[in-house]
Structures are given as structure tokens and as C-alpha cells.
Image: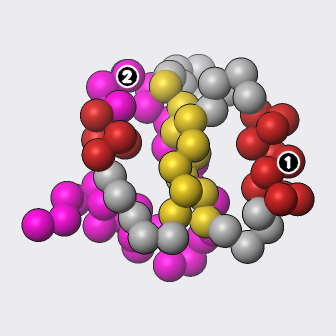
Amino acid sequence: MESRIGQALARLFEKHRIVFWYDAKRELRADFESVALAGVEKTEIDNNAFGIKHRILREQPDDKFLLYRDGPAAGGSG
């Protein structure tokens, strides 16, 4: 059976090409690693934001991406 997280992500990807997953409490990495969505590339944000942006906007502008960050959103109050 598909996980609740997987189902929620699938619904988001029906409307969005890029979904950001911020794991503020650093407790969902296993869920990120285990989720598998057809046609969605999973990528971790880890001091590589410029490279990811280039790939998403220039190299693969039609592909879907799930971007995971371990910790709060940048600039957030946590």
C-alpha cells in the first residue's frame, strides 16, 4: 500500500512540477529515501542550490522534482 506521504506528494505533483520538502526536525529522511514516485526525480539540497537550479530550469525544464532539505527552510525561523 502506498504511504500517506507518497499519496500527498502525488497529489501535489498533479498541480506542480517542483515540490520542496523541508524536514525541519530532521526526522523524515527515511521517508524521503523510501518514497518512489513515477516520473519524479528526488534531489537533496545540500550546498548545491545553484547546480540544482540550473538543472531544473535549463537542463530538464519539463521534468518533475522533489527537492529535500534536511533542516528548516533557508531564512526561516525554524
Label 2: how many Cα within 10 Å (few below 14, some 14–19, many 20+): few
Asked if the stretch drawn in magenta spans residue 2, the answer is: yes
Q: Residue 11, relative to residue 73: is it above or below?
A: below
For residue 75, say whether it is visible.
no
Identified at 56% across, 77% down, the residue is 15
Please name the residue shown 75% across and 42% down the image.
52
Identity, as a three-letter code, of the amino acid under mark 2: Lys
Of badges 1 and 2, the one in the foreground is 1
Image x and y of residue 33, in percent: 35, 40
Which of the two discs, 1 and 2, labels the residue nearer the N terminus? 2
Q: Name the residue under label 1.
A: 54
On the image, the x and y values in percent for residue 61 come to 79, 67
Q: Residue at x 85, y 48 (%)?
A: 54
**Mark seen at residue 25:** 2
Question: Where does the magenta region start and end?
Answer: 1-29
In terms of depth relative to the viewer, which is nearer, 40 or 75? 40
Question: x and y percent of residue 40 in the render?
Answer: 52, 63
Q: Is residue 44 left or right of residue 75?
A: left
- Residue closer to the observer: 25 or 32: 32
Q: Which residue lies furthest to the left in this view?
A: 1
Residue 3's place in the image compared with 76, above or below, is: below
The residue sitting at 57% across, 43% down in the picture is: 43
